[in-house]
Image: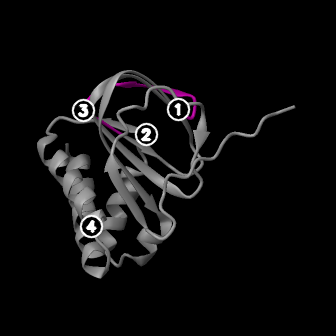
Amino acid sequence: MHEQLPVKDKSEEYKFIKASPFDTSKRKTTPHKHNRYFELIYLSRGSGIHYIDSRKCPITPPIMFFIRKEQVHYWEIDSTPEGFVVILKKDFFDRSLDGELKTLFMKINKYTCLCLKDTSTIQKLLELIVEENKKEGDTAFHIIEGLLKSLFAKVLGA
């Protein structure tokens, strides 16, 4: 009998975005997928392998991984990871009126991972996104839009 692949959902039901530090206790996970969101994972520390749709991606910080809906992935991490996770639901982009943000997202969405060089700005932008994500309302949403636009532009230009 064929077992069905687990579907994990780390998003928050009433939020369009979730941003948090990477779980430092995470080491090995079983193959799974997410069917409700896009996941961006930035690692500034750690080593091991991240498997994405059967592709073996070495963890060579600083690195950013991009997990699209329905992609199968799992971790085999050898050392303490450090970084951030940003979960973006389709509703976030549906609500956004920023065409350039959507264009940058479409460009970034083509990658599985990117090795980064200049990470000080990327680190600061992710820290700001985590802080703004704790707030509610239109102002926080618009600030996060701007921060994500800056993050995507910086990552693509890195």
Q: How far apart are marks 4 and 2 (CA)?
A: 23 Å
Marks 2 and 3: in contact by CB < 8 Å?
Answer: no
Q: Where is mark 3, residue-wise?
A: 62
Compare marks 3 and 4 and give the one earlier in the sequence.
3
Camera-near label (4 vs 2) is 4
Quick check: can you spot residue 77? yes
* Crowd rating for badge 4 (residues with CA inside 10 Å; few <14, some 14–19, many 20+): many
Judge from the rendering whether residue 8 lies leftward or rightward of residue 65; answer left or right: right
Which kind of residue does numbered mark 1 sit on? Answer: Tyr
Q: Whole-percent x and y of residue 47?
A: 34, 21
Q: Distance between the residues labelled 3 and 2?
A: 14 Å
Q: Is 89 included in the stretch rendered in magenta?
A: no
Identity, as a three-letter code, of the amino acid under mark 3: Pro
Give the residue drawn at x 27%, y 54%. 152
As drawn, 26 above or below 110: above
Q: Where is the N terminus found, in terms of image quarters?
A: top right
* N-terminal-most mark, 2 or 1: 1
Where does the C terminus fall, quadrant-wise? top left
Please tell me whether mark 3 or mark 2 is closer to you in this view.
3
Residue 147, picture quadrant:
bottom left
Name which of mark 1 and mark 3 comes first in the sequence.
3
Q: Distance between the residues labelled 1 and 4?
A: 28 Å
Q: Which amino acid does label 2 sit on?
A: Thr
Span shown in magenta: 52-64
Q: Which amino acid does label 4 sit on?
A: Ile
Question: SS for tag 2?
Answer: loop
Residue 60 in view here: no
Badge 1: how crowded within 10 Å, few (<14), some, or many (20+)? some
Which numbered disc covers residue 145? none
Q: Which of pointers 3 and 2 lies earlier in the amino acid sequence?
A: 3
